[in-house]
Amino acid sequence: MPTISTTELVNRAKAAADMHDSFITPAQWMFWASQERMSLDHLLARSGWALDFETTTITVAGTESGAFTLSDGVSPISVMAIVAVHEYGSAGTRLLTYSDTVSFLHQLPGSAITTGHPSKYRIRRNEDELVFNFFPNPTTGLTFAVTYVPHPLKLSLDANLADEYTDYVTYPMGWEERIVLGMARRALEKEDSDSSSVIRQMQRVDSEIEELCWARVMSATPTIRNVDAATRGWGADMIYPPPLSWWWA
């Protein structure tokens, strides 16, 4: 995939908005670029395009009172979406089902009424932490793999990059154009200019991305999966649910 610098993104956005001055500051361009990059990544994920997954673990120590936080220093600001939670051990892996806050409450988190291997989980924000609850409440020693999509790095024009920043993006098939057009739309609207033509271009790019993602998904060889075995039993594969079942941060 081609590497597109943040300088090129700004120059292309200026051309799309037909701007020839410094009405927009470099900091403002990069704030918009970061926001539009997030929008593009959301679109790709919802459309079924495979994003880069990362995995961390939760191991039950028995002192959590039902509230489990991510390990390895993973914080809410670094997570765009929780893809799946698997319990794993010597027998293999098994997929847990995500549950919303209300449907989850079969018992209070941490209750000892029902314990064992969980079948469901939920997620709550607690200031700078993501807190997981499980049902049934897991017993000491169980380990869970949490797969998530990391939040994309913020974009910058600076020569010396701070942590959580980058000065380039990489997307297939010229999809960074969606970032460029989003930046151009924001610039036109800031100066009270007509942005309708740029919005139409954004809609065309969105449609092309969705079509290409769908074509890729449909081109895969059809397979039959034993979902019951994946959720109730143990297997060798880590099966991931579709984006509609992810928890979005």
Image (cartoon, rainbow, N blue to C red):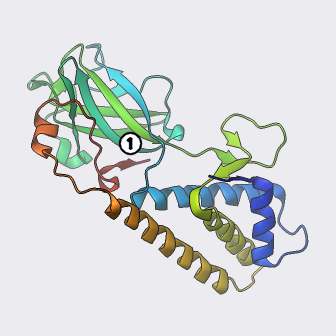
Residue 141: image location, x then y, percent: 24, 13
In the image, farthest residue toward the right = 21
Residue beneath the point at 82% across and 44% down: 158
Label 1 Cα crowd, 10 Å radius (few <14 / some 14-19 / many 20+): many
Q: Secondary structure at mark 1?
A: strand
> Residue 163 versus residue 226: which sits nearer the camera?
226
Q: Is residue 25 left or right of residue 78?
A: right
Labels in figure, total: 1
Residue beneath the point at 65% across and 54% down: 34
**Image quarter for residue 220?**
bottom left
Residue beneath the point at 27% across and 56% down: 221
Residue 107: image location, x then y, percent: 14, 34
Residue 115: image location, x then y, percent: 12, 23
> Residue 175 versus residue 173: which sits nearer the camera?
173
Q: Is residue 32 left or right of residue 51?
A: right
Q: Is residue 5 left or right of residue 61?
A: right
What type is the residue that disc 1 sits on?
Ile
Residue beneath the point at 82% across and 36% down: 160
**Rendered position, 134 above or below 151:** above
**Rendered position, 182 above or below 118:** below
Residue 142: image location, x then y, percent: 23, 18
> Residue 136 versus residue 242: which sits nearer the camera?
242
**Image quarter for residue 39?**
bottom right
Which residue is identified by label 1?
82
